[in-house]
Amino acid sequence: MKAGGVNVVPGILSVVLTLGLWFVVPIPGGVSVNAWHLLALFVGTIAAIIGKVMPIGAIAILAITLVALTGVTNDSPSGAIKDALSGFSNSLIWLIGIAIVISRGLSKTGLGNRVGYYFIALFGKKTIGVGYALALSELIIAPVTPSNTARGGGVIHPIMKSIANSFGSSPEAGTSRKIGHYLALVNYHINPITSAMFITATAPNPLIVKFIADATGADISITWGTWALAALLPGLVCIALVPLVVYAVYPPEIKNTPDAKTYAQSKLTEMGVMSYGEKVMIFVFTLLLLLWAGVPALLFGNDYIVNTTAVAFLGLSILLVTGVLSWEDVLKEKSAWDTVVWFSALVMMATFLNKLGLVNWFSSVVENNIEHFGFGWPISVMILVAIYFYAHYFFASTTAHITAMFAAFYAAGLALGAPPLYLGLLLAGASSLMMSLTHYATGTSPIIFGSGYVSMEDWWLMGFIMSLVNLTIWGCVGGLWWKLLGFW
């Protein structure tokens, strides 16, 4: 039931939860009044996001307003509004916003589709080859597509559906199991992995970078290159396994697909030679990767270090000057501006929860409960990560989950003796890999699930299986890789 722009029932529950924490629940010892009241606003905000009370950007505006009016961060009204708006000054937020605008060029120029059809033309003779083609297409465009929903649901999924339909595989005809069921599961389960491989592959990743830096007093500040290098090996192993694991659990009826290669080649022929816009996008794409990876600094020294967000602005500037994107395109990219607004609000609230000592208090509670088992840090971290990961069954937003739990669980892991960078990279990977679990885990889920190729039972079973595979690889292969790199 809606009243105005609000879903009434979850809205009432969010308000009751906020007021209950503010006025009814006793404030624990060691927690300040302001910290507890900010927690009440924060919990209410997360509940509103989970319950879809309003669009997330609108909820963020309400959160900023309440922080400013209640003065939970600052007794001065002018200081309170400065605190409430402080998230907008975070450069990582603008990195994601600008990168989303840049990714618009992939769809506008058709380069994203060209990449997908190109790989299918190369590997499309067998069904499993089509699966790998979809995986490689995702991987190629992931670094410059901060919306995993746009990447997996907006670019790759339509290509996947076209291939399935070309083989007469559709939910409407009851022929999903021919090939569509398999391809849809591969389409989806690659998405969390590519999201885990780059800071710029999904919107909440920069939030994780900030949480880790805050918790370590900026001793650990993960760069784009460090993240990409750390995730390279475990990510590639996971990607290599997804088409095989899905094939083993749910084998498609059609095993050979020579027509897929022909279909992809016909689509490439239809697209014609590469356009001016596509060529500029490839140039910008290459430039961003080189600068984000810190190649100039590696070759010529620290004088050539370029700020990651400045690089994103450079890429957008080139696209504007060359006319590949117009200012109208920038203004129409609603998801970018929406992300900047809600991201700023959540970063602001999380930052002040940390400053007011609430995160340290909660992490000590988690730490003490795990410490009672008497395990060493490796097993303690396994327990910690498992709780954090599988709690995503109760979340419909990775952003809400990460904002609510990451900082406290990271601090608890540090207190339990885990190496800081190892723990950070493991939790960072888990924060994207947990998208695999349900049909509501992230924005990509309802798009692919909603196409009807996969039943809910199959989706949840495959999600649980892939969660075990991905967590094992990230913890074991990743852990050994990070040891070899000297990260712990």
Image (tube, rainbow, N blue to C red):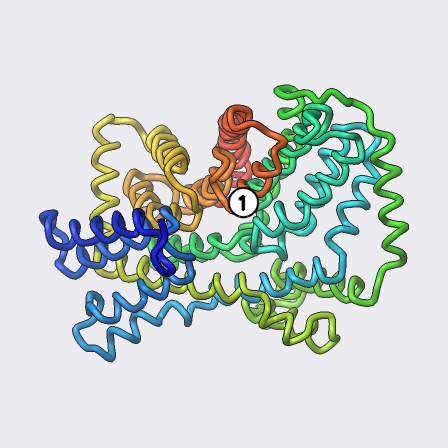
For the point 68% across and 20% down, the residue is 251
Q: Nearer the viewer, residue 391 or 454?
A: 454
In the rendered image, which residue does mark 1 sit on?
A: 196
Q: Is residue 24 left or right of residue 86?
A: left
Task: Kindly indicate the quadrant of the structure image that contains residue 62.
Answer: bottom left
For the point 37% across and 62% down, the residue is 60
Q: Is residue 386 left or right of residue 269?
A: left
Q: Nearer the viewer, residue 432 or 14?
A: 14
For the point 65% across and 19% down, the residue is 248
Q: Is residue 364 left or right of residue 91?
A: left
* Residue 324 visible within the image: yes
Task: Kindly indicate the quadrant of the structure image that contains residue 84.
Answer: bottom left
> Of helix, strand and loop, which one carries label 1?
helix
- Estimate the x, y position of residue 274 in percent, counting from the top left: 85, 59
Asked if residue 98 is positioned above or below residue 160 in the image, the reply reads below
Q: Amino acid at mark 1?
A: Ala
- Estimate the x, y position of residue 470 in percent, counting from the top left: 53, 32
